[in-house]
């Protein structure tokens, strides 16, 4: 199956013309000129919801997204056209996707979404492309089932970290943070909090890639429930400052007490400013 979806509207032409005009004149655009612009869907209109999006640093036209049951899609014209580039693989569910900042031809895809609600699909590990998505090969972690995030060292495309949520329906021994220093040929689990604690998110400081943050989540989805339980023991926020050799759990200083649920985390390039979205309750 190979679909090519193309979207075009007069609004795009106006916007493109405006951008070229701005570039040509190098003048400040009055705010009122852009006040009428609104977000709109640019497609593709298939493949289901998306939890994984990435782009090529310095390239405002090339982007990828992974849908939870429709594979990986790519655009090289800022969303005017989208092409499926993962159809030849045996798995369609994409949970994580990342372009290597130092080499835009290297792309890692983690299969199996981490949004473990009633309708979900599982994966069979990490896939890698070295030709910007033209071809793929599985590089391991096949029993991780649900992968929440992949981050790549911005200086070295072979150093990659994977946050594995693990099996959706029960404890298993594949949860945690994994690291590869050889482009996926071998993997080492560098954060392991036990078979019930998965990793819900992972972030790397772009200017200080020895600093990473990981969110842990005690979760599985009971077959009789639409969504996974929100909180449980073992949920937390962890930090490493030595490229995942050692981790420290962050507590107090404004972070909530008690059991946590899902944690999402983002970090500034210098590693000093951190944002965490935490499910927590009494």
Image (cartoon, helix red, strand yellow):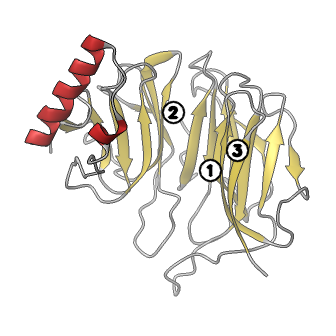
Viewport quadrant of the N terminus: top left
Q: Is residue 124 above or below residue 242?
A: below
Residue 281 lies, in percent from the top left, at 75, 77
Residue 213 lies, in percent from the top left, at 74, 42
Q: Residue 46 occupies which quadrant of the picture?
A: bottom left
Task: Tell me what residue is drawn at x 55 percent, y 50 percent.
Answer: 147
Residue 8 visible in image: no
Residue under circle 2?
Answer: 139
Residue under circle 3?
Answer: 177
**Lower sequence index among marks 2 and 1:** 2
Residue 137 lies, in percent from the top left, at 41, 31
Frontmost of labels 2 and 3 is: 3
Residue under circle 1?
Answer: 164
Task: Tell me what residue is drawn at x 58 percent, y 75 percent.
Answer: 228
Judge by depth and name the residue closer to the eye, 185 or 227.
227
Q: CA distance from mark 1 to mark 3?
A: 6 Å
Q: Is residue 223 found left or right of 261 in the rendered image?
A: left
Label 1: element kind: strand
Task: Tell me what residue is drawn at x 80 percent, y 48 percent.
Answer: 238
Label 3: element kind: strand
Check whether the beta carbons of the residues at disc 2 and disc 1 lie within 8 A of each other. no
Q: CA distance from mark 2 to mark 3?
A: 16 Å
**Lower sequence index among marks 1 and 3:** 1
**Lower sequence index among marks 2 and 3:** 2
Badge 2 local density, few (<14 within 10 Å), some, or many (20+)? some
Judge by depth and name the residue closer to the eye, 205 or 248.
205
Residue 132 visible in image: yes
């Amino acid at each position: 199956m190979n679909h090519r979806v193309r979207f075009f509207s007069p609004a795009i032409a106006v916007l493109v013309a405006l951008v070229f005009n701005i570039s040509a004149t190098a003048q400040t655009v009055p705010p009122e000129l852009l006040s009428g612009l609104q977000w709109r869907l640019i497609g593709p209109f298939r493949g289901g919801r998306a939890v994984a999006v990435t782009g090529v640093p310095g390239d405002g036209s090339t982007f990828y997204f992974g849908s939870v049951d429709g594979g990986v899609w790519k655009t090289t014209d800022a969303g005017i056209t989208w092409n499926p580039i993962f159809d030849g693989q045996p798995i369609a569910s994409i949970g994580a996707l990342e372009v290597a900042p130092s080499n835009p031809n290297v792309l890692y895809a983690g299969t199996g979404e981490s949004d473990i609600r009633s309708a979900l699909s599982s994966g069979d590990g990490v896939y890698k492309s070295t030709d910007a998505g033209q071809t793929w090969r599985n590089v391991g972690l096949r029993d991780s089932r649900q992968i929440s995030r992949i981050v790549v060292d911005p200086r070295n495309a072979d150093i990659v970290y994977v946050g594995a949520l693990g099996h959706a329906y029960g404890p298993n021994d594949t949860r945690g943070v994994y690291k590869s220093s050889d482009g996926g040929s071998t993997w080492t689990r560098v954060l392991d909090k036990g078979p019930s604690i998965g990793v819900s998110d992972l972030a790397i400081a772009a200017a200080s890639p020895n600093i990473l943050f990981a969110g842990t989540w005690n979760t599985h989805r009971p077959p009789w429930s639409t969504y996974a339980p929100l909180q449980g023991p073992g949920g937390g926020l962890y930090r490493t400052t030595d490229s995942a050799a050692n981790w420290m759990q962050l507590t107090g200083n404004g972070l909530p007490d008690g059991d946590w649920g899902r944690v999402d985390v983002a970090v500034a390039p210098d590693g000093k400013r951190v944002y965490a979205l935490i499910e927590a309750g009494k």
